[in-house]
Image (tube, grey):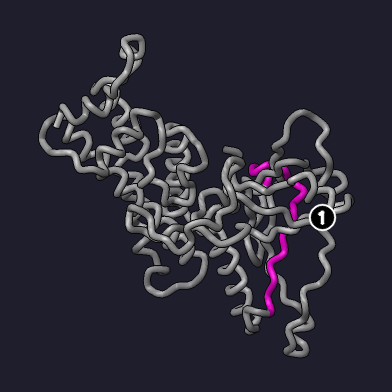
Amino acid sequence: MLSTLDSLMRPEMSATDSEEVPDIDSLAERLDTIRDHFPAELLETVRKSRSTPAQQGSKGMDGVLVREAAYLADVIAKIKDQVRLLSDALQGSSELGNEAEDVAASILREEVPSCWGAIGLPPTTCLSLSVWVSHVAERSQFWASWVASGRPKSLWLAAFAFPKALCTTICRRHAVKLRAPVEAIKLHYEVRAMADLEDVESLPPPSDGCHVHGLYLEGCSWDHRAHSLAHLTGKETLTPLPVIWFRPKAQRETLQTGVFAQASQRSGFAPTCYRTRSQTLLNLHVSTRSPLDLPKPLEEGSLLDLELPTKVDPEAWVLGGVKLLLSPL
């Protein structure tokens, strides 16, 4: 078994390259680092979401919590199992399977193993392993905090593997409140005046919908005074958006006549929403299953249809390749 690991770390190389080849101790150290990002108590806290009222049939925001946290907990558990198996193999107490060999080789190259890419942040984002692990750990902390302390006043959208499910849940809750068909509810996105998350913490939660933070614009900026998209003025191509209110509203024509009105002419610009700046549209492998035997949390097309006000011709943003990002990674 150790010879197998040794062969993974010592491919045919020249004498000048041999000193740069990681040894078994290096693999063990990297496995410890990954393990430290996911302490047992963190995983256990996230798993407690299964015992919330949502698990017993609730379809509100608790249902979003259960689905997201349970999904992430299952994936992290499988990652930790693979790390444990590799650690046992290093100690000579077990044999490596083909998948474990691939995982070990990827870790040594500081790459995300292909079978770990089922958390809504696939390895195809070209992130290094350390950055990817840190991001997944931050997502775990977000859901663990929700489980332990209740729903936060603003939701970090990058933590969601299923962001469209959040939007659907908001509309359904509002439809139940108004006793209206869900088709009559449309989600509006209102950029708040406050730019910092700390400002939201001092406010009561909105009566309908929720506050969301952590979104970024690539290719343009946000003008706080004009409350509009604006051209970039500096060298930075990536700018953060303020907190956004995901606010459900009923379409009056639908409620009054029962006839679903055609979508009105857009008065703003809805940039295509990506998960990260280096990722292509999340419309690939929608019907496939991941190597971890979990459904891929990838939605077809843009992640959000988030229309933002603009005083510039929207065509200019299209030609400029303006994008909306859930993460600056």
Quadrant showing the C terminus: top right
Residue 91 vertical position relative to residue 81 in the rendered view, above or below: above
Q: Residue at point 55% right, 54% down?
A: 282
On screen, residue 317 versus residue 111, left or right, reads right
Residue 145 position within the rendered picture, expressed as x and y whole percent measured from the top left: 45, 48
Q: What's drawn in magenta, residue-wise? A: 184-199
Give 17 or 25, whichever is nearer the viewer: 17
Q: Sort mark 1 into few (<14), some (14-19) or many (20+) by Cα contacts within 10 Å.
A: many
Where residue 204 sits, quadrant-wise, is bottom right
Q: Residue at point 64% right, 55% down?
A: 211
Examine the structure image and report whether residue 238 is included in the region drawn in magenta.
no
Residue 158 position within the rendered picture, expressed as x and y whole percent measured from the top left: 55, 48
Residue 224 position within the rendered picture, expressed as x and y whole percent measured from the top left: 82, 44
Where residue 174 sits, quadrant-wise, is bottom right
Q: Residue at point 18% right, 39% down?
A: 96
Residue 167 vertical position relative to residue 193 in the rendered view, above or below: below
Where residue 290 sits, quadrant-wise, is bottom left
On screen, residue 77 versus residue 57, left or right, reads left
For mark 1, what is the residue?
Answer: 309
Residue 327 position within the rendered picture, expressed as x and y whole percent measured from the top left: 59, 43
- SS label for mark 1: strand
Residue 46 vertical position relative to residue 170 in the rendered view, above or below: above
Q: As shown in the figure, which amino acid type bears the numbered disc 1?
A: Pro
Give 181 or 12, whichever is nearer the viewer: 12
Give 263 or 287, whichever is nearer the viewer: 287
Outermost residue to the left: 93
Quadrant showing the N terminus: top left
Outermost residue to the top: 16
Outermost residue to the bottom: 257
On screen, residue 159 versus residue 71, left or right, reads right
On screen, residue 102 versus residue 59, left or right, reads left
Q: Residue at point 22% right, 27% down?
A: 7
